[in-house]
Image: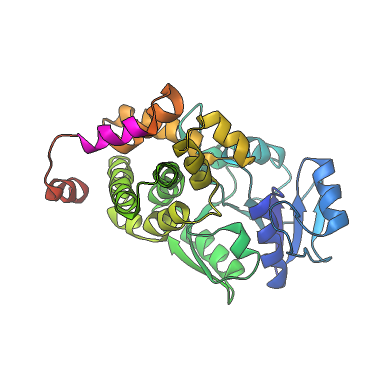
Amino acid sequence: MANILILGAGGFGTALAVLCDKCGHRVTLYSPFQQEIETLSAAREHKKLLPGVIIPESVAMTWQLPAHSDADLVIVATPSFAVRGVCASVKGILSPEAVVSCVAKGFEQESLKSLSVVIAEELPQNSVVMISGPSHAEEVARGVPTTVVAASRNRAAAEFVQDTLMNPTLRIYVNDDVTGVELGGALKNVIALASGACDGLGLGDNAKAALMTRGLTEIARLGVAMGASTETFAGLSGMGDLIVTCTSMHSRNRRAGILIGKGRTARQAIDEVGMTVEGYTATKCAYELSRKRGVEMPIIEQVYAVLYEGRSPDEAIRNLMDRPKRHESEVIWLLSR
């Protein structure tokens, strides 16, 4: 049995609390928002995000962090923009032996740093493990079979997460390619926004399949430029996460994209979804990273223009279809260099 501290009581944090409790671990679910914790404690259910999923009484909930934590495993389950702050809040209270894992997917917008780097900067004594893959909270909480990747530069830490969390409904693979796993998890949200826009425009299956395929190529191209392995993008945190996020109505990014395709502005779509849409910020970060690295990413460029420059989705599609002729083997060569 492990002592597990989950930072963030949203949908994924709550789902993981339920899952970890079923595994027999001692679980504490933390949110800095007193009202959120009091509501969850009273209802024993996240009525907005996970209706019908009961939070066991054995899961402790708190909005106040202790002076010292005996957690063996800490799971960061906040939106990407809150990762640095929540890690700073536990600085000094964790044992150096505690493993810090993170299920958030994105970048720190101001610095373009990956979340693993952000966590390591705030908690340099602790090993960091990034968890990614096709894993909607709605399904994790209900025990639907799910498979993810635990990526770390410390193999022992990744294997500890694998041993601690793996159970009959959650299968975990380990991976050493932290850069590739993080990029796949963050940038698939951008492609999901575009995929949703295709649905909103009524473009059909052909366009969506092309967008997903070429989108994965762009993600891998940037990843290779940043030192990632091409193989990672064919795995769970690449292709797997891309498929689930581009095709499921559980996906906030796809839902926001559908609204944009139907004529809403990016801000209107995000407000209507009513929750964090990570792809919005990830688009800007990916666009800036591609320019910084000199990597051609035409889909990312068009999504950026729609979200931040007011370009219509129709015009963006036309721009992509009118690009100069290419041979597909050129892409294979670029990724295999």
Kindly tell me whether residue 249 is visible in this rendering: yes
Which of the 4 image quadrants contains residue 64?
Answer: top right
21 versus 221 height, above or below = below
Is residue 39 magenta-colored?
no
- Residue extending farthest to the top is 309
- Boundaries of the magenta span: 314-322
Q: Nearer the viewer, residue 203 or 23?
A: 203
Q: Find residue 178 and report its horizontal and vertical position in percent.
A: 43, 50
Q: Nearer the viewer, residue 143 or 323?
A: 323
Instruction: Look at 12% across and 39% down and name the residue there.
Output: 325
Q: Find residue 253 and report its horizontal and vertical position in percent.
A: 51, 44
Instruction: Look at 80% across and 66% down and name the residue there.
Output: 56
Q: Nearer the viewer, residue 192 or 69?
A: 192
Its colouring scheme is rainbow
Which of the 4 image quadrants contains residue 97?
Answer: bottom right
Instruction: Look at 38% across and 49% down and name the residue there.
Output: 180
126 sits left or right of 149 in the view: right
Q: Find residue 210 and report its horizontal and vertical position in percent.
A: 28, 50
Kindly tell me whether residue 64 is visible in this rendering: no
Magenta part, dominant SS: helix
Q: Nearer the viewer, residue 169 or 74?
A: 169
Q: Point out the image quarter for the N terminus.
A: bottom right
Which of the 4 image quadrants contains residue 60?
Answer: bottom right
Instruction: Look at 48% across and 59% down and name the residue there.
Output: 134
How many dots with numbers?
A: 0
117 sits left or right of 10 in the view: left
118 versus 62 height, above or below = above
213 sits left or right of 176 in the view: left
Q: Find residue 99 and report its horizontal and vertical position in percent.
A: 60, 55
